[in-house]
Image: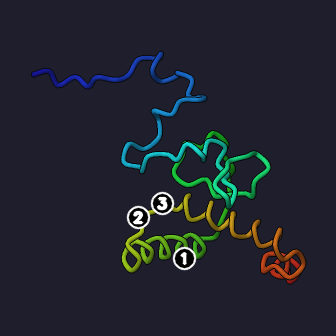
């Protein structure tokens, strides 16, 4: 048996991933075809003009960088562990952040000036 490690070639490393569904986590539940654009009306019909939904477990092509303090990172990790231990939800930090963003944006749309996000930003 050879001790050499087999590495992927350049074609594999630099392949295009746009539009590929095979890259989605194989352990994830089957995607609902109505969620093609990530949004579903209350009546079940998907349209691009529907209300915004969190992106769930899909491949994300866009990226942002957010800097947090050490305490904020520990709080985020503590929340992740609490979700796993107490609520049996195995989610990563990115999923928690995406859901929090969704809730904040939804609150601004629904409550405007009275939303918790607007109130907290005004305090700073």
Name the residue located 84 percent from the left edge and 77 percent from the top edge.
111
Q: Is residue 26 above or below residue 87?
A: above
Say whether marks 3 and 1 touch (CB < 8 Å): no
Q: Which residue lies furthest to the left in this view?
A: 1
Nearer mark to the viewer, of 2 and 3: 2
Give SS at disc 1.
helix
Q: Which of marks 2 and 1 is in front?
A: 2
If you read the primary sequence from the N terminus, does the residue marked by circle 3 or circle 1 appear first?
A: 1
In the picture, the disc for residue 75 is 1
Where residue 17 sits in the image (x, y, percent)?
55, 28
Side of 81 relative to 65 (left or right): left
- The C terminus: image quadrant: bottom right
The reply to whether callout 2 and callout 3 are in contact (CB within 8 Å) is: no
87 or 7, which lies in front?
A: 87
Apparent side of residue 34 relative to residue 2 in the rendered image (left or right): right
**Residue 92: image tag:** 3
* Marks 2/3: CA–CA distance: 7 Å
Q: In which quarter of the image is the N terminus?
A: top left
Using the numbered discs, state the Cα–Cα distance from disc 3 to disc 1 in whole angstroms: 13 Å
Structural distance between the alpha carbons of marks 2 and 1:
16 Å
Residue 109 x/y as whole percent: 83, 68
Q: Looking at the rendering, which quadrant does residue 85 occupy?
A: bottom left
The secondary element bearing badge 3 is classed as loop
According to the picture, the residue beneath numbered tag 2 turns out to be 90
Label 2, secondary structure: give it: loop
Q: Is residue 70 left or right of residue 49?
A: left
Q: How crowded is mark 2: few (under 14 residues within 10 Å), some or many (20 or more)?
A: few
- Crowding at mark 3 (Cα within 10 Å: few <14, some 14-19, many 20+): some
């Amino acid at each position: 048996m050879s001790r050499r490690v087999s590495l992927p070639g350049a074609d594999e490393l630099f392949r295009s991933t746009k539009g590929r569904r095979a890259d989605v986590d194989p352990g994830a539940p089957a995607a609902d075809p109505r969620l093609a654009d990530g949004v579903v009306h209350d009546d079940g019909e998907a349209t691009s003009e529907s209300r915004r939904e969190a992106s769930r477990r899909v491949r994300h092509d866009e990226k942002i960088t957010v800097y947090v303090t050490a305490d904020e990172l520990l709080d985020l990790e503590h929340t992740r562990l609490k979700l796993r231990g107490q609520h049996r939800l195995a989610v990563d930090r990115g999923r928690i952040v995406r859901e929090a963003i969704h809730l904040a944006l939804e609150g601004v749309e629904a409550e405007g000036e009275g939303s918790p996000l607007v109130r907290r930003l005004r305090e700073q």
